[in-house]
Image (cartoon, coloured by chain):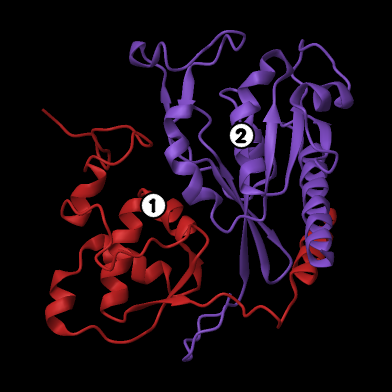
Chain colours: A purple, B red
């Protein structure tokens, strides 16, 4: 990054936004932390009795904090391109933030927990409505029942151009593969729209 | 009562003592009403700020000016200063109004096509 100020200023790098969505406890914070050079901007607060009724803990026992603001990480790719990952607050009561976060985004990853697949319906619906390219990444939690990607595709009624992949949100190589799949899907979507 | 040497009374990481919007004087909307994108890039212009305006700069304004010597995104500023993005936007608008900070225009489309950028991202991800 340069520090010389000429007028008019030109960008010394380009910054691209990718959203990480999914239900509460689906692994968004873990995924961002697995691949980002910047420590995620942790603004997690302890779950208190005030959130009972809002934060459904069924099936995610052991989770005692909830993300109240943004998980955020940066991946610097070469000299001039950076990817910025933003975790979309999963709960419906934060959905007012989604439009702002989605503005100008390249695409999105929807993390799915097969034990609570319906948790990712709001994200899937949202990105379909926004016509934002996305992939569904099934986070393979220890002890979670194993499903084939195609079973999940059918359960979510996804269009054929939406990739469904299995992943381990803790593992860099796995998260990298998810992002590569997403960027390919974005590229394919753009190629399609430029042909029509 | 003794204060531990060099210590503070609160734990590190317990967050700021000052409520977030206290540093904006209670303002929650940028003065120009423009909501900067999280990945908008800003930079200090190096223009001198007139004496009256300089008097009104808060320590947070000054920290922004310091970090913005290099081009930086709004989100990175928030992480760097430990302040909510909403607060950063208000403070940036003040500095933009004083011509101390400029929003860097996105690279013009056409200079590099979208597919080129995507390919660069793909190559970069594979090399991680």
State whether residue A15 is above or below residue B7: below
Residue in view at x 50 percent, y 67 percent: B72
Q: Is residue A43 left or right of residue A74?
A: left
Is residue B125 something one can see in this rendering?
A: no
Label 2 and label 1 in one chain: no
Residue highlighted by disc 2: A123
Residue in view at x 47 percent, y 36 percent: A95
In contact (CB < 8 Å): disc 2 and disc 1: no
State whether residue A71 is above or below residue A77: above
Q: Chain of mark 1?
A: B
The residue furthest bottom is A7
Residue B10, label in figure: none
State whether residue A85 is above or below residue B37: above
Task: Check the picture and name the quadrant holding the N terminus of chain B.
Answer: top left
Give coordinates of residue B55: x percent, y percent: 13, 74
Give coordinates of residue B110: x percent, y percent: 71, 81
Give coordinates of residue A52: x percent, y percent: 40, 11
Residue highlighted by disc 1: B85
The residue furthest front is A196
State the SS at label 1. helix
Q: Chain of mark 2?
A: A
State the SS at label 2. helix
Mark whose residue sits in front, 2 or 1: 2
Is residue B20 something one can see in this rendering?
A: yes
Residue in view at x 36 percent, y 36 percent: B12
Q: How many marks?
A: 2
Q: Could you classify mark 1 by the number of other residues whose Cα lies within 10 Å: few (under 14), some (14-19), or many (20 or more)?
A: many
- Could you say which quadrant of the image residue B119 lies in? bottom right
Give coordinates of residue B27: x percent, y percent: 20, 54
């Amino acid at each position: 990054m340069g520090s010389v100020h000429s007028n008019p200023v030109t960008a010394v790098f380009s910054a691209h936004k990718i959203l990480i969505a999914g239900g509460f406890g689906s692994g968004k914070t873990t995924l961002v932390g697995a691949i980002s050079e910047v420590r995620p901007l942790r603004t997690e607060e302890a779950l208190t009795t005030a959130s009972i009724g809002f934060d459904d803990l069924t099936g995610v026992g052991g989770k005692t904090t909830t993300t109240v603001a943004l998980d955020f990480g940066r991946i610097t790719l070469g000299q001039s391109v950076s990817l910025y990952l933003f975790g979309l607050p999963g709960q419906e009561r934060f959905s007012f933030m989604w439009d702002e976060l989605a503005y100008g985004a390249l695409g999105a990853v929807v993390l799915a927990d097969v034990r609570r697949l319906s948790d990712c319906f709001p994200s899937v619906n949202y990105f379909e409505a926004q016509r934002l390219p996305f992939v569904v990444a099934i986070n393979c939690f220890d002890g979670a029942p194993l499903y084939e990607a195609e079973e999940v595709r059918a359960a979510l009624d996804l269009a054929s151009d939406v990739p469904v992949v299995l992943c381990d949100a803790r593992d860099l190589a796995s998260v990298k593969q998810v992002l590569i799949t997403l960027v390919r899907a974005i590229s394919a979507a753009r190629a399609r729209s430029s042909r029509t | 009562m003794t204060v531990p040497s060099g210590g503070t009374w609160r734990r590190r990481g317990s967050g700021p003592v000052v409520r977030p919007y206290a540093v904006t004087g209670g303002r929650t909307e940028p003065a120009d009403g423009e909501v900067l994108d999280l990945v908008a890039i800003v930079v200090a212009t190096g223009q001198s700020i007139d004496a009256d305006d300089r008097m009104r700069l808060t320590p947070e304004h000054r920290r922004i000016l310091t970090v913005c010597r290099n081009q930086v995104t709004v989100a990175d500023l928030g992480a760097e200063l430990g302040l909510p993005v909403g607060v950063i936007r208000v403070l940036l608008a003040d500095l933009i109004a004083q011509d101390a900070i400029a929003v860097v225009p996105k690279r013009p489309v056409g200079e590099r096509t979208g597919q080129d950028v995507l390919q660069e991202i793909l190559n970069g991800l594979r090399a991680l």
